[in-house]
Image (spheres, rainbow, N blue to C red):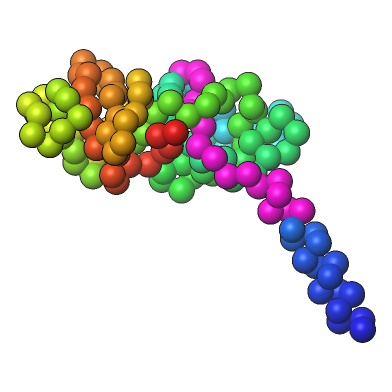
Amino acid sequence: MKKIAIWFLYLSIFGVQLLNAEEKFLSLKKNTTNVRYGPGLDYPIKYIYRKINLPVKQIDKKENWRRIIFLDNNSGWIHSSQLKPSNSIITVEEKFLFKKPSNFSEPLAKLEKGRLLVIKKCEDNWCNITTDDYKGWVKIKNVWGSTK
């Protein structure tokens, strides 16, 4: 009977933690974002990201703080005021940018692995994106981030 009570307690605590860890993609709102060791200003800065719209994956939250992980598996805590709904993806392999959402459309550029793409809209398996001097359509297969 004691073992059942311990298991019930363990599962109830673990279940509450799973509910709090709402995983979703977000994007960095500012050009400079501090990532901290813990959820508060009292925690030291772990590193600084200097890329607006960079997609991050939220893996936990505590009050106004979000624990995030980046494509390179770096993780840390960011204040929610520094984040916005996801509007970008990163290529995880080389891709072609097309004029229209079709493989038979005119190719505009070859995008290297790791390229940040800001999403304007998505249809089926294609997204209309901007990146530096380019605008066009890219297939959303093999990208990191959310297209929804």
Out of 68 and 8, give the one closest to the viewer. Answer: 8
Q: Is residue 134 left or right of residue 118?
A: left
Instruction: Please say whether residue 27 is one of the residues in the magenta stretch.
Output: yes
Question: Residue 122 location, x and y as percent?
Answer: 34, 29
Q: How many marks?
A: 0
Q: Quadrant of the C terminus?
A: top left
Q: For the view shown, which residue lies furthest in the front direction?
A: 124
Q: Is residue 47 above or below residue 75?
A: above
Q: Position of residue 93 (x, y in %)?
A: 23, 44
Choose between 91 and 37: the one closer to the eye. Answer: 91
Quarter where residue 91 is shown: top left
In front: 3, or 66?
3
Quadrant for residue 109, please give it. top left
> Which residue is rendered at x = 86% and y = 81% of the image?
3
Residue 45 visible in the snapshot: no
Task: Residue at the far right: name it.
Answer: 1
Q: Position of residue 70 (x, y in %)?
A: 46, 41
Q: Residue at x 56, y 25 (%)?
A: 83
Considering only vertical position in the picture, is 109 above or below 11?
above
Q: Is residue 30 above or below residue 17?
A: above
Does residue 81 appear to the left or right of 15 in the view shown?
left
Q: Is residue 83 left or right of residue 10?
A: left
Single out the residue that lies furthest toward the top.
133
At a point 28% along the width and 24% down the height, the residue shown is: 128
| Relative to 94, residue 14 above or below | below
Q: Which residues are magenta?
A: 16-31
What residue is rendered at 89% in x and 75% in y? 5
Q: Is residue 4 left or right of residue 62?
A: right
Does the magenta segment cover residue 79? no
Q: Position of residue 90 (x, y in %)?
A: 34, 36
